[in-house]
Amino acid sequence: MFKKWTDKRWVRTSLLLSAAIVAVPAVNVVAEQLATKMPTAEIHKPSLLPDRVVLTWEGDTATTQAVTWRTDVNVNTPQAQIAVATDNSDFEDTAMTVPAESTSEVATYLGYSQKYHSVNFENLTPETTYLYRVGDGVNWSEWFEFTTASDQAKPFSFLYVGDAQNDILEHWSRVIRNAYSDLPDASFIVHAGDLINHGDADDQWGEWFKAGGWLNGMVPSIPTPGNHEYARISSSTPAGLTPYWRPTFALPENGPDEAVFKENVYYVDYQGMRIVSLDTNLRGVNLDKQVAWLDKTLENNPNEWTVLTFHHPVFSSAEGRDNAEVRNKLLPIIQKYNVDLVLQGHDHTYARGQVVNQKSGQKVVDPDSTTVFVNSVSGPKMYESSSEVWDKNGAQVDKAIANTQLYQLIHVEGDVLRYDARTATGKQFDEFEIVKLPNGKKQMIEKKN
């Protein structure tokens, strides 16, 4: 009898709770009347404690690792400590202290200034797991972990995401977290521009870092700038790439010599793959200079795999958009070197396809140009989808979807690259393989899902 009564009570209670949950409106009127909204400046202002920790690379991925973090302006002894990881806390006894090699002060439109500090760990051992922390010698972050790349071409995987941009903490956080949950061994993350909506909005950068959380300090980022990294929220911010970009990300300076290209046009080599970032916000002569640099960079590429990332798609997939100058100048170089993957953003839709030839009245993939072009979006902002630019410019869309947040898992093993696009809830949407054949050609294998 007691068990039966307990079961009934449980059923009744569950029904009442369910009804209560259904009855709660999306906007809580009582809370709006009684709660106090925390000021944006209070939420995001820096302190003596390090935050916004992010890993990148300035140099060799097998023997170096860069880290950047933020504090308030009163920190004058920024430094990091690093040690080979162990299975207990004894590693602290052998930790090496490295003073910050650069510190940049950035003013915000929220009324406070902050400092960004950077350390480049050097002379590391390939394929080795390290622990590190950042601070000022007294105030420290937790210990983070990373593993150096191999100095050989070995299997690895990475994540690729398009525009986060809007409602970042609210709606992008689950996407990047689900992506990492599906690929916890990711070697790095490619961000294809528009990480935020206004390049000089400190609160938006704060949301981006909070959404990724400790993941940013464990898995290196390879970011490329979008047009919203050039957008301003304050009239006092100078025109051009956001003043946050270089202080926030310590990136290679192996691009063209001019200052306008520093740390936004660069390449990274990782275990048999060359990943190249271009800044397609820079047009005219500045795009010409990138094209000339890209030609040399791909001509002298010792890696088996080549990936380009930039923001504005060669073939737009949103209604009313077209980047003709980007396509006219970059596509010949992409085809000349038969680049494997081009990872883009900007259009807030998803499209994946290839260049085609007309043969016997039908479109077929050009066997001498088997580059796969992808546009993707990870944030909540969406546009209407269109294949018009693809159709008019000798390309075909093989897979497309609108109004869907996605993330991509990419695996590389020997002569095979496997690509896996998933929706925000982890449902598989698009999958294919690129196989490099002994005769030098590539084979594209569609996977049904």
Image: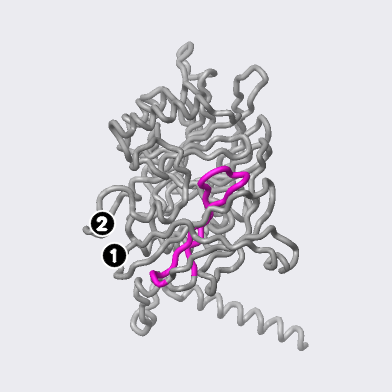
CB of mark 1 within 8 Å of CB of mark 2?
yes
| Residue under the point 65% across and 52% down | 147
Residue at left offset 37%, top offset 45%? 226
Residue 70 horizontal/vertical position (percent)? 45, 64
Q: Position of residue 23 (x, y in %)?
A: 46, 75
Judged left or right of residue 108, residue 419 is right
Residue type at tag 1: Tyr
Q: Which mark is residue 237?
A: 2
Instruction: Name the residue type under label 2.
Output: Thr
Q: Position of residue 311 (x, y in %)?
A: 40, 41
Give the quarter of the image for residue 385. Answer: top left
Query: Which span is picked out in magenta?
Result: 50-74
Along the polypeptide, which appears first: circle 1 or circle 2? 1
Q: Residue at x 59, y 38 (%)?
A: 419
**Magenta stretch contains residue 361:** no
Residue beneath label 1, please?
109
Q: Residues within 10 Å of mark 1 (few under 14, many from 20)?
A: some
Relative to residue 281, is residue 102 drawn left or right?
right
